[in-house]
Image (tube, coloured by chain):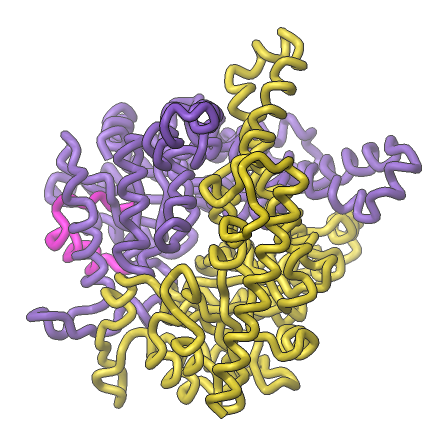
Chain colours: A purple, B yellow
Amino acid sequence: MDRLVEAIAEKGGNPSLVGLDPKPALLPTQLIRQAVEETDRLVEGQSEACAKAGANGRDDIWLDRLAQAYLRFNLAVLDGVADVVPAVKPQIAMYEALGLPGIRAYMATCRAAGERGLFVIGDVKRGDIGSTADAYASHLSGPPLTYRQAVQGLDGHGDAEPPGASGAAVGSPWMEDAITVNPYLGSDGIEPFVRAAGASKKDLFVLVRTSNPSSDQIQELPVVHGPGQGERLYQRIGDLVQDWGSGEIGTSGYSRVGAVAGATHPRAGAELHQRMPHTFFLVPGFGAQGGNAKDVAPMFDAHGCGAIVNSSRGIIAAWRKESGYRPDLSVNATLGVVSTGARRSAVLMKQQLLDVLKEDR
Amino acid sequence: MDRLVEAIAEKGGNPSLVGLDPKPALLPTQLIRQAVEETDRLVEGQSEACAKAGANGRDDIWLDRLAQAYLRFNLAVLDGVADVVPAVKPQIAMYEALGLPGIRAYMATCRAAGERGLFVIGDVKRGDIGSTADAYASHLSGPPLTYRQAVQGLDGHGDAEPPGASGAAVGSPWMEDAITVNPYLGSDGIEPFVRAAGASKKDLFVLVRTSNPSSDQIQELPVVHGPGQGERLYQRIGDLVQDWGSGEIGTSGYSRVGAVAGATHPRAGAELHQRMPHTFFLVPGFGAQGGNAKDVAPMFDAHGCGAIVNSSRGIIAAWRKESGYRPDLSVNATLGVVSTGARRSAVLMKQQLLDVLKEDR
């Protein structure tokens, strides 16, 4: 987590990140209208032959234009927050919902955030086993076979190198600095990600205690494990996370294996910190999900460090509360308001968090 | 699960499916060489200006050509098995590893399988909460906002319809008939998928007991839950799966919410069937992962129904054992051997499963 810890320090100790989770209902009407108009124009411009070839022509073009609207929206948010926050967390589900053009917009968003010096946490919640987990870990370490490896293999200069070994040199098309991972499959579902993170100098965050109400159903189940009778499942997972990261502790004192722990469970957070002193926390649930700065304070360690708090809607939909927003603004003026709103709410969140952390110490 | 149950009946009661999980090490050298040669040709054909614009030009082209090799390989497998098996299960991780062209190959594979009358289970193991789970559920129900809905919204003919409500009419770009889902986030992580499955007449499979060795670490943990002291976590998840599907039981007697339970745990399977009489099982772990036909027999119900068994490497890498395979075969001849091998091993697997199920009754 050294790079993330550094990025936080560079932003005046601001421990917050912006969730880039666009969906149609969060976009200003102007962007939806622009996407419709672009679709109409492109459909008209298609030759009749083209139009016949793809029965879904208009629907495909629409998804491409909607994805473009997501990207424009994200770029406006990024312009607003890039010098305020250390990191962003695009939620890949929102982009997958649009199919291929959505994934393209996701990658372009990650790239644009990286170019602005932001640490990019891909919220992908992947998880699988063995060679499949290796394949998902390509998000961090790059493709399973590079051109150079393929040519070497064909020339008989030894076998193709093992996955992840030198893939990092080529770089992953996904452009994430860290990803989130689901622990339900146990160690052999996580270790490939840990190896890939080590090889590529990136990080991961394992789900431990999520911020949704029904997470109790499973994560709060009392489990019987060795001497620790009466532990909760998320506590057991927390211990595993601490183990998984034990070989990858950086100069900051935190390992490459972080934990996701929702701000809606402040008590769990405080106690997890004690259990997992080398674990950095990603804390969702601030703002729209109900958590406030006081709620998240226990998610930080005694020095006010060791956690980063995510807000999505609170920042990216802040344009709605801007006095400068009017439904008849041009697209460019609207994007300006998206930037201003995101910036204003990101600055406010920073102030709220720093105030509470100062009080706490 | 009615469509899957029907597809199994149409294939002579064959309860097996083929895992389409390509990776470089499983592809014949000829396909890798072809991808290298295509890359070289395309790089040479690029104008100098193009080449300068994209520093990663060759690496990007390579991933596109490797993805094309995956697709060619899959089509050969599909041609071999399409009239033998009822279903296929592409593992999206393998495709994600190649970035955008990989995802394109995944979608093209799903489409090609559907066109050959096969039921397509997208092994995506997604899972998240609330509006994010809604977005992932777009895999089944289609995009969150269609062109028609956008235009209606702008015209003021009422608000845009809720996600999933009419998206199914447009169709999902993902082309899956069912997907796999991770349960770690509890009910509000699953219910959006159940709603989308109902609306789009598709299905899902929730991870209950995975086939990897370390799944014990978490899934076998004894949990304390109400009266059921000493239950295992996977059993509790099994009960939840049965609940989640209770409103979506089809004419086959099985609900839209199936369960993933590995063939490496036959005892767990038998007992889960008793706990979950309306749940259809997806059983990974046959063949390369160590399970044989006898091991998976307990995963079926008393009538030899209620489950489908997956084999990946055993089928898609069967070309290696074909007497007709030689390293100097042409690409087309190689693809022919891939087809023949896949078909031969799929027929063998069908026979083994049907024999054991016959004995069992």
Q: Which residues are magenta?
A: A265-282
Q: Quadrant of the N terminus of chain A?
A: top left
* Residue depicted at x 59% and y 87%: B253
* Residue depicted at x 48% and y 88%: B359
The front one of B152 and A136 is A136
> Is residue B5 found left or right of A76 in the rendered image?
right
The front one of A271 and A202 is A202
Magenta run includes residue A197: no
Relative height, residue A140 to residue A128 (above, below)? above
The front one of B158 and B194 is B194
How many discs mark residues in the rendered view?
0
Residue B270: % across, % down: 39, 84
Residue B19: % across, % down: 52, 58
Relative height, residue B298 to residue A355 (above, below)? below
* Residue depicted at x 62% and y 53%: B77
> Is residue A223 found left or right of B339 in the rendered image?
left
Residue B328: % across, % down: 57, 34
Magenta run includes residue A279: yes
> Looking at the image, can residue A305 be seen?
no
> Is residue A145 found left or right of A130 in the rendered image?
right
